Image (cartoon, grey):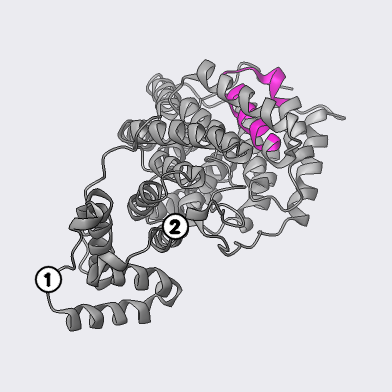
Amino acid sequence: MVPPPDALPEHVLLVGIDDPLARVLWRASRDISEWVAAPQSSRASEPGDAALFREQLAYVVSKTPELEEAFGAFGLLRLNPRLAQRSSLARACQQVHAWADARGMQETALLFAESWGRIDSENPIAANEAGRAARRTAHIHRAEAWFERAYTIAARHKNRREKIRALIGHGGLLRELGRYSEARDKFFDAARIAASTRRHRQAAEVRHELLTIAVETGSYAEAEPYMRAALREYPVHHRAVPWLAHDWAFFLVLLNLYKEARVLLEAVRPHVSRRDLQVVIEGTLGRAAAGCGDRDAYELCRERVLVLSSVHGEYAAAALAHLAVGAQFFGEWELAEGMGVRAIASARTRHQLDVERGATEIVRAIRARLPAPPQATLPQPNKLAVIERDMLARLRAWTKPRRRKVVDDPEAGGRPDRPTGEGQPTGPRTDPRPEPPHRSR
């Protein structure tokens, strides 16, 4: 079995931060690494002022009461590591990971997901969450190692749900790296297991991913059946429904159907509360608005992307590439090229090869002063119009699922009532290629 990657340095928690919470999390992460590495007999309490430590702990608990249980476990580990329980520490790391992930604190989420995976080494959920966190922070090799580990553990314990999640997560990573053939193999394996076990929710996620590859590789004939299958198999309130709408809108943008895409994107926007995910929504919407000739709407989206991406950079490259095309519509060549160059740089930093490829094509077209393709004509009746109508109906009926509490002991083989990442796509579809092979539909 693939071993866990070496522990990341905890100092990333303190970079540019002078905050008691960051210091306590840093200390907890360091203590956990030492606790996992040390033999049971050599564990001893940390020397220092116990009263001062308890005072600091009480302060951070007062500021983040939702993590009181986790900080209690970390406090016991520091003051008396011989009494620390593996199950309590695993649960604490899981809670901090979910808390940080929900707030866009990606490095913190990764550190504690990986700590969870090391402490609860036979839990495939922990390994899958570590893989997803590593993928979001562009730690490519770490993500691959964790997904491979999750698959092996899930197979050993006959946990088909986590086996499918590992395949979907790994396949999504390979797709982002442009390794489409390998990604398809992962998705087809996941589809086979999901179909044989009647896991419709996960089958829908696989169809969603295959839709993405069909669009990014120009296999547009495959996109429609995959979209219909995902829409049919996703439960009404599945977390990924808004992202399915976004990804279909992205497909419409590539077909130069900007008006139709804009309608969907404006319906999706109210359902997205996470700032890091708003970046890509605003970028795609800005491109669609520019295609409709709406300069004011484009400028508003551009302003939002620039503000949000200064803090939340995971999807900044794709959003900037979309905004480059938006400026191309208005003949703002310097602005367009600047946005495109920034998109390429951001994509390279995060190893997003599919986005880098699309952004490079966009910059090439901008430097050649080629105009962006105009709105295409959509004949009526049309299958695409029917899908958009059905998608809008699903969005009107959609409400965000509530996150459920963890009720089981991970060490005892228990599982969170629902994994923190389940039901969410591995990431919005972002390959911002400049134009499709067909100008009209």
- Magenta highlight range: 203-224
Secondary structure that dominates the magenta span:
helix
Q: Nearer the viewer, residue 179 or 300?
A: 179
Q: Quadrant of the N terminus?
A: top left
Q: Position of residue 258 (x, y in %)?
A: 64, 36
Examine the structure image and report whether residue 221 is included in the region drawn in magenta. Answer: yes
Residue tagged 2: 94
Dot 1 lies on which element? loop
Q: Is residue 357 above or below residue 335?
A: above
Q: Position of residue 5 (x, y in %)?
A: 31, 37
Q: Nearer the viewer, residue 346 or 380?
A: 346
Q: Is residue 78 visible?
A: yes
Q: What residue do we see at 31% from left, 82% from top?
A: 58
Q: Amino acid at mark 1?
A: Pro
Q: What residue do we see at 59% from left, 47% from top?
A: 422
Residue tagged 1: 47
**Residue contact at pointers 2 and 1, CB within 8 angstroms:** no
Dot 2 lies on which element? helix
Q: Amino acid at mark 2?
A: Gln
Q: Nearer the viewer, mark 2 or mark 1?
A: 1
Q: What residue do we see at 54% from left, 41% from top?
A: 284
Q: What is the crowding at mark 1: few (fewer than 14 residues within 10 Å), some, or many (at least 20)?
A: few
Q: Earlier in the sequence, mark 2 or mark 1?
A: 1
Judged left or right of residue 153, residue 224 is right
Q: Quadrant of the C terminus?
A: top right
Q: Residue furthest right?
A: 381
Dividing the picture into quarters, in which one does residue 271 lie?
bottom right
Q: Is residue 188 above or below residue 95?
A: above
